[in-house]
Amino acid sequence: GQTNSQDQMLRARAQSVIPGGLWGHLNAANLPPGYPQYFARAEGCRLWDVDGREVIDFMCSWGPVILGHHHPAVEDAARAQSALGDCMNGPAPVLVELAEKLVETIPHAAWCLFSKNGTDATTACATIARAATGRRKLLVARGSYHGAVPWCSPSLAGVTAEDRAHILHYDYNDPASVKAAVAEAGDDLAGILVTAFRHDMARDLELPNPAFAQTLRSLCDSHDAALILDDVRAGFRLHLGGSWETLGIRPDLAAYSKAIANGHPLAAITGSEHLRTAATKIFTTGSFWCGAAPMAAALATITTLHALEAPTHLKTMGERLRTGLAASAKRHALPIRQSGPPQMPLMLFDNDPDFRLGNTFCAAALDAGAYFHPKHNMFLSCAHTAADIDRALEAADAGFSAVARVG
Ligand code: PMP
């Protein structure tokens, strides 16, 4: 961007009042050159940045927007609930309706709890597993992201060894490493956390292989430990009943957030019957956790996801994108790799260790009207139509042309 752009001016002002300009992974300093930090408006699958550029979006707010921005059924439900009351001395009736809807939608679930962020949900799952078993050790896949608090944050700044004392690691999709970590936990194993698929940043995505998923399930069964599915990122995009329904493996606890309310702030834990007592014993709460408008938004979101058969639509659109990207890359004789479920795709260039090619591709595609990500899995939404995908593929073709030029 130009130095006199609105985006650059906002970034310069933020630099003095927000440490680093912006916290966490949404800091556009980590994105290819020209990527905006600030957005003015969003509608359906389109975003407008503060300098008025319009793009077709493939990040969907990094997951939350699954139906498209301003889905009328969701916004009407949230507005109607807001008009009645949102932050009250206790919940509105929609709490019970939403809990019933989740228990009906998610086969392993006998009950649920609500909070705000994915981190709240994964952390409470860990606490419930420990409360239920009276044991301490939690197994986590090396490199998997579960949130932004000391037990799981990717940064060690401000984290003590004691915060991580009972976290043991295994390798995703490697049953032998899981068995070794279970052996290391001995008689102190509380639970095993696992993401829906391997979606670590900056490497090819990996679907869980069935033998790996089955190993986690049987080890948790034989050790009376909790299998905790972190479905915060993938939840509702792969299967409405939980992402591992596609494998026929049911967790004991699952964490949801992101897409649950189409962008309204909400997280949920679902639990199996045998963990109900433990969930009753832990103390978990937050000032905004009973907010009624996001719950109304979630109820409308889940109802609409069922009506649209969302995972199927997202898959169809994702496959259209994948096929188009492969054809376009081939026309330009550029070797690429595409990985992950079509609903949450990633495209990487071969021989691109520093992401120079990926960044060049993304910067040029952005200029041509599509917002892709060079190293994080992307997200499809129900607002993406075949015409939007085809339009984005034209922008991608401009991206491949730019890569072919730099060689
Ligand atoms: N688990 C996974 C798999 C995630 O992708 C994320 C967020 N990217 C979280 C947990 C944490 O969610 P939140 O940022 O809402 O706290």
Image: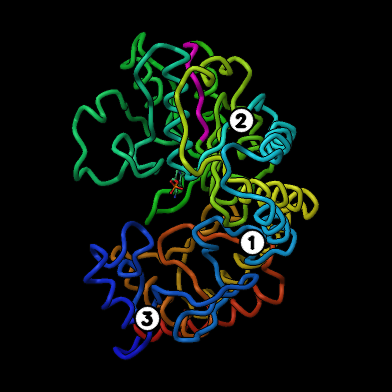
User: What is the three-letter code of the residue carrying label 3?
Assistant: Asp
Q: Does the CB distance between marks 3 and 2 fall below 8 Å?
A: no
Relative to 385, is 262 on the left or the right?
left
- Specify whether residue 48 is in view: yes
Instruction: Check the image and report above or below for 103 versus 273.
Output: below
Label 1 CB less than 8 angstroms from ligand 1:
no
- Mark before the other along the chain sequence, 2 or 1: 2
Q: Which residue is mark 2?
A: 112
Q: How many marks?
A: 3
User: Which residue is depicted at the point 47% across and 75% down?
Assistant: 39
Q: Residue 270's image quarter?
A: top right
Q: Residues within 10 Å of mark 3 (few under 14, many from 20)?
A: many
Q: Which residue is mark 1?
A: 381
Question: Closer to us: mark 1 or mark 3?
Answer: 3
Task: Name the disc covering residue 7, or none.
Answer: 3
Distance of label 2 from label 1 (alpha carbons): 25 Å
Q: Kindly identify the residue that appears in the image at 62 percent across and 67 percent down.
A: 321
Q: Estimate the x, y position of residue 292 in percent, counting from the top left.
A: 62, 46
Question: What is the x, y in percent for residue 232?
Answer: 52, 44
Q: Residue furthest front?
A: 89
Residue 348 lies left or right of residue 292; in this view the side is left
Q: Amino acid at mark 1?
A: Ser
Q: Position of residue 37 (x, y in %)?
A: 39, 73
Q: Residue at x 69, y 64 (%)?
A: 71
Badge 2 element: strand
Please state the horizontal and vertical placement of residue 273, each as a whole percent of the image: 63, 18
